[in-house]
Image (tube, grey):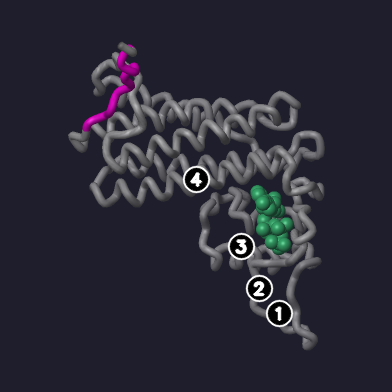
Amino acid sequence: MALWSRAGRMGLGLGLDGSVARLACARGLRCSLRQSRESQGGDGADRPQSSSGTPRLPKIYTRTGDQGFSSTFTGERRLKDDQVFEALGTTDELSSAIGFAIEIMMEKGHTFVDELEKVQCRLQDAGSAIATPLSSAREAHLKRTAFSEDAIRDLECWIDAYTSRLPALTAFILPSGGKSSAALHLCRAVCRRAERCVVPLVQAGQMDANVAKFLNRLSDYLFTLARYTAMKEGKEEKIYRRPDPQP
Ligand SMILES: Nc1ncnc2c1ncn2[C@@H]1O[C@H](COP(=O)(O)OP(=O)(O)OP(=O)(O)O)[C@@H](O)[C@H]1O
């Protein structure tokens, strides 16, 4: 049960009531998630308590990860360089990059940041699935961390809508097109790395293939949105040019 709380502290989408917690949640929220879980009678192995029995203010750290091991949602202790944590960390990085892009885009008043916030929530769900290796998952774990195909369908719908408003692509474009667009290209590149981390887990039968499909579609969405954002802002997208032939 400690694992579940630990996944919560990491900000995975494993809220006590199954609700989504923010991936890049504030430390305070991480604490409150933990406090809330503890108050519901979870494993108290890492629960701080004073000698008088009065609960102390919860802390973000337990020091249990200091030896380089951490926990999956299913209760396994694994080295932190395990593929599961690599994938988990990369989806976290992706959500953080998207959060940064959102902040830049909000300065420009873009309305489609709502979609990006939904994507961040789905990445939280992806993190929950990643933290739940199928080999050690019980039915209850699977029920809680199933990754919905709806998230993939949403992305496809958004991609099609933006594509229909964009001029056809006739050349390779470089990550460019203003700050918002460039930030989205950076997110796209992180997304592709997250996909590379997740694919081996899917191939090994350790996780739901929908997460890999979601990341694959998400990089297309981020690419399309980057182009659309550049167009909306009237910023030029730089195109790839071959080097001039040597004389
Ligand atoms: N370096 C990491 N990269 C990606 N995921 C991690 C990493 N370390 C831990 N996790 C995941 O995030 C969850 C919460 O992280 P947390 O930092 O609390 O773990 P810890 O390092 O094991 O513990 P502590 O920080 O209390 O010593 C863990 O249960 C694990 O699933």
Residue drawn where x is 64% and y is 67% of the image: 60
Q: Amino acid at mark 1?
A: Pro
Q: Are marks 1 and 2 in contact (CB under 8 Å)?
A: yes
Residue at the disc numbered 4:
95
Dot in front, 4 or 1: 4
**Image quadrant in which the C terminus is located:** top left
Q: Magenta residues, as a range?
A: 236-245
Q: Position of residue 159 (x, y in %)?
A: 37, 25
Q: Is residue 212 above or below residue 113?
A: above
The answer to whether the beta carbon of the residue marked 1 is less than 8 Å from any atom of ligand 1 is: no
The question of residue 109 being in magenta is answered with: no
Residue at the disc numbered 1:
55
Our reading of the magenta stretch's main secondary structure is loop
- The tag earlier along the polypeptide, 4 or 3, is 3
The answer to whether the beta carbon of the residue marked 3 is less than 8 Å from any atom of ligand 1 is: no
Q: Position of residue 136 (x, y in %)?
A: 81, 39
Measure the alpha-carbon separation of dots 3 and 2. 10 Å
Residue at the disc numbered 2:
58
Measure the alpha-carbon separation of dots 3 and 1. 15 Å
| 51 horizontally vs 13: left or right | right
Q: Secondary structure at mark 2?
A: loop
Residue at the disc numbered 3:
33
Residue drawn where x is 48% and y is 26% of the image: 217
